[in-house]
Image (cartoon, helix red, strand yellow):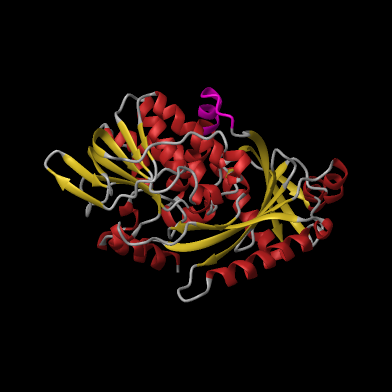
Amino acid sequence: MTTREPALRIGEPLWVQPERQRRRQRYARLTGRHDAEIAIVGGGFTGAVIAEAFAHAGVSVALVEGQLAGRGSTAASSALLLQEPDQGIAQLSERHGARAARRIWQLGRDAVSSLIATLKQLDIACDLERRDAVLVAIGDERARELDVELRRRERAGFHAERLNAARVTALTGLTAPPVTIGARTIGNAQIDPCKATIGLLAAAAANGAQIFERSPVSRIERYRHGVRLHTAHGRLEARRVIIATGYATDRFRPLIGRFRMFRTYVLATARLSADERRGIGFGDVMMWDTERPYHYVRWTNDRRLLLGGGDRRVRPGRRRSVEFKQATTALRQDFESMLPALRDVDIEHAWEGLFALTPDSLPYIGPHRRYPGHLFALGYGGNGMAYAPLAARILLEQHRGIHSYDHELFAFGRFRPPSRSALRRDAHRRAHLS
């Protein structure tokens, strides 16, 4: 862990303006010797959700963050709490089977509902607002794909309101390029990610969790009773350690090949008047499209429009600053073609974040055979905040020795090669069908 990691974000996220951070809780560095039943490495949103859940359950917790809590990838998020995974139910069914796909979708819904309930119960001031989500298909090919997806969702018990082009335009103001169909779902939400993270950590600390900032972990070693984490000025001993760093750092180099690294981009407009908002025509919904890479839009509570997407694969050797300028320029042009009134609106903030994507866009949650005493919560793609409560639940169950089918859906081993008998059965089915 001593190797310098790439910056998790660049630019000026809306959530970390000085006036927004003035009252945030500060935590001490880890110095001297400390003990806990569970150590958590990573003080972003996922680490905070896990810390709060474990502390609330009466487990002794110590969380260690290398910089300032909530100021890494969390600060780069646009904080859409979407129930739907990055991959549709049709794609997940092809990869994992219909039963698994249905369960994954249900768990996504449950996780968002659980998170909303937790934030409300803890009375965390994080600009939480429920929002319907509108998924838009542009062009005939994307429309056919969305139509198949919606029929698969309906059969699996997940209803979405079908929208024709006129209805999409009424909800979003989107007129160009021509929209073919859309789908509207309820039960989603949006937050200020930094405020939510700080609030969750405060709730964890109130239940006895130890929180340490500005304490990069240089080494993790196994010893007879568990694991020992070393920082520049102290050490922490625990029964287990949970790695919630977003992706596999150099400390876990054998796992790096399981992730593809991407950069995502977000723009925030200036605050808009009521007349300017009406002129744009975008309603009180969250919208994203079926393009790859996709685009998404939402309002903030202070009347700004957040415009995001345009994800790009991280390529070695490319100048990050140059790519940032190119990507944010392209993103603005894309949105101006969708919502022409944006051409007259100033962009006040632009930023970029780094995130990891797995082959099926689902996170890895749980143990890995190469790392005894470790549990992981990594690779969330675009659904990091939505899946964080699910990670907390699964890891708490695993810590308590509870086994569940749900664990298998997010395990590292879900990509095991098929057995010979399975291959023979598949060959027999193909022969029968032909």
**Which residue extends farthest left?**
224
Percent of width and height locating residue 266: 63, 56
Where does the C terminus fall, quadrant-wise?
A: bottom left
Q: Quadrant of residue 416?
A: bottom left
Percent of width and height locating residue 296: 66, 53
Q: Quadrant of residue 19?
A: top right
Percent of width and height locating residue 356: 45, 58
Percent of width and height locating residue 282: 78, 47
Q: Which residues are magenta?
A: 115-125
Who is closer to the viewer here, 91 or 245? 245
Compared with 206, 166 (above or below) is below
Please report the residue visible at 75 percent of the width from the left and 49 percent of the height from the top: 270
Is residue 276 highlighted in magenta? no
Task: Give the dominant element type of the magenta stretch: helix, strand or loop.
Answer: helix
Left or right: 148 as drawn, with respect to 33: right
Compared with 143, 131 (above or below) is above
Q: Determine if residue 212 is in view.
A: yes
Is residue 124 highlighted in magenta? yes
Who is closer to the viewer here, 252 or 348? 348
Please report the residue visible at 35 percent of the width from the left and 46 percent of the height from the top: 215
Where does the N terminus fall, quadrant-wise?
A: bottom left
Compared with 388, 266 (above or below) is below
Q: How many marks?
A: 0
Left or right: 391 as drawn, with respect to 310: left
Q: Determine if residue 401 is in view.
A: no
Please report the residue visible at 60 percent of the width from the left and 43 percent of the height from the top: 18
